[in-house]
Image: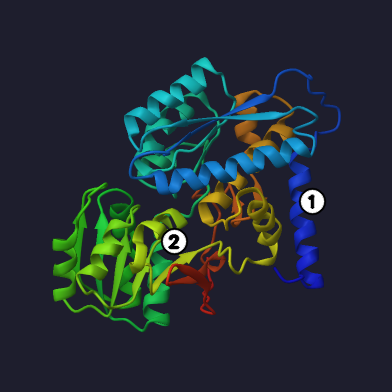
Amino acid sequence: MQASSGSGRLQRRKVLQAIAAAAAVPPGVVWSQSEPIKIGAVLSLTGPGAGLGGPERDGILLAEKVINERGGVGGRQIKVLIDDDGSKPDLAKSKAEAMIFTEKVPVMIGPSLTASTGAIAAITNAEKMAQLTFTGLGPPIEMSYKTLYHLLPPQSLNARAMLEYATKGAKAKKIGVLHDTGYGQAVMASLKQVSEKYGVDYVAVERFEVGATDVSAQAAKVRAAQPDVVFVIATSPVPFRNARQMRLTQQIVSAIGSASYDYVRGMGEFADDIVFPEFVVGEAPLPRQKEFVELYQRAYNALPKNFEAAGWDAVHVAAKALAKAGTTNREAIAQAMRQPHEGVMAGYNFSAPDMTGIDLGSYVFSRLDKGKFTRLPFTTSGA
């Protein structure tokens, strides 16, 4: 990696200062030097969402290690308890219940998938405890959960970012869509809501079940409609492979939920000419991301992307809130979290109406070429 410019070094120092702040203790507060502070995390480590949960876990574990090496929270170590929900909402709920009621964790991280987020949020909301989820704002009921904080943008913002590139970058008017019935369904609903201002026509919209192993029939129908570009929205590499196998040669535009190296490996030789509106391009990180990318490379001998960064950010947000609250009281921690936070993936504001605070200008756009991501010069702006 080449040496950074003076401005890059300054930016990285700011990130390090933010990390150190997570371990600071408010004046007058004394932590007991007892067992580590436990943080609960329920992730999709197996099943269709494993391509998200695995990277999230890696970011979480790296953040735990770095925070503890730098003194923990007020001199007290943290311990993230991680469990697998198998990508199933009912299992996510039972795993979270064990964390909350048996382990007595003061804050929850996860889950990885939209349906599981709601299953856990019903519990954390009742307990008035903070939940840092790796999904964007989903069904309307999530707006009623006042301690549910999102580390990924709302689906309406993902939809706008996709349409910004499709219409202004690819100059498309006709769009074909392949989407799953989970994450993809949520993004598709938002695409329909915001598409009028972009003047596009959805010439084919084909859906498939989460976890489907073959969507060739749906891909063939999209190809027959002759779109200018194809939106593939899923948490699986299968539709990308099938689209290319069915000779869909148009550029594919996807959402952040598919921007994972695990999914890229699953795409195999078909991981080519796919554009992602996302936040972290490990091959070309933004100045505020370089320190994290370097730490991640040293730890894992690999490059991180969005979900690794979100995992890192989640633990730092939790640590910062614990330090500010000066207690493991759940309600106090949830309240301490309700503020802006400068993360590696993005800048958040958990007091914003969408409980995320990410704006459209925060996106970077990457293109997957023969299994490698490159950051595109295309940018957008706006809230």
Mark 2 or mark 1: which is in front? 1
Q: Give the vertical position of 301 relative to 174 (above or below).
A: above
Which quarter of the rendering shows the N terminus? bottom right
Q: Can residue 342 be seen here?
A: no
Q: Residue at x 60, y 52 (%)?
A: 348
Please name the amino acid that badge 2 sits on.
Leu
Q: Is residue 117 above or below residue 241?
A: above
Q: Which disc number belongs to residue 157?
A: 2
Secondary structure of the residue carrying tag 2 is: helix
Q: Mark 1: which amino acid?
A: Gln
Q: Is residue 244 visible?
A: yes
Q: Can you give x and y, in whole percent of width and height, for residue 68 in the image?
A: 73, 35
Give the spatial CA distance, label 2 vs label 1.
29 Å
Q: Where residue 339 sits in the image (x, y, percent)?
A: 65, 45
Q: Determine the image quadrant of residue 333.
A: top right
Above-or-below relation of 317 to 93: below
Q: Residue at x 49, y 50 (%)?
A: 354
Nearest the camera: 17 or 374? Answer: 374
Please state if 42 lies on the left or on the right of 115 as rendered: right
Asked if residue 165 is positioned above or below residue 305 in the image, the reply reads below
Give 354 or 110, whichever is nearer the viewer: 110
Local SS, label 1: helix
The residue singled out by tag 1 in the image is 17
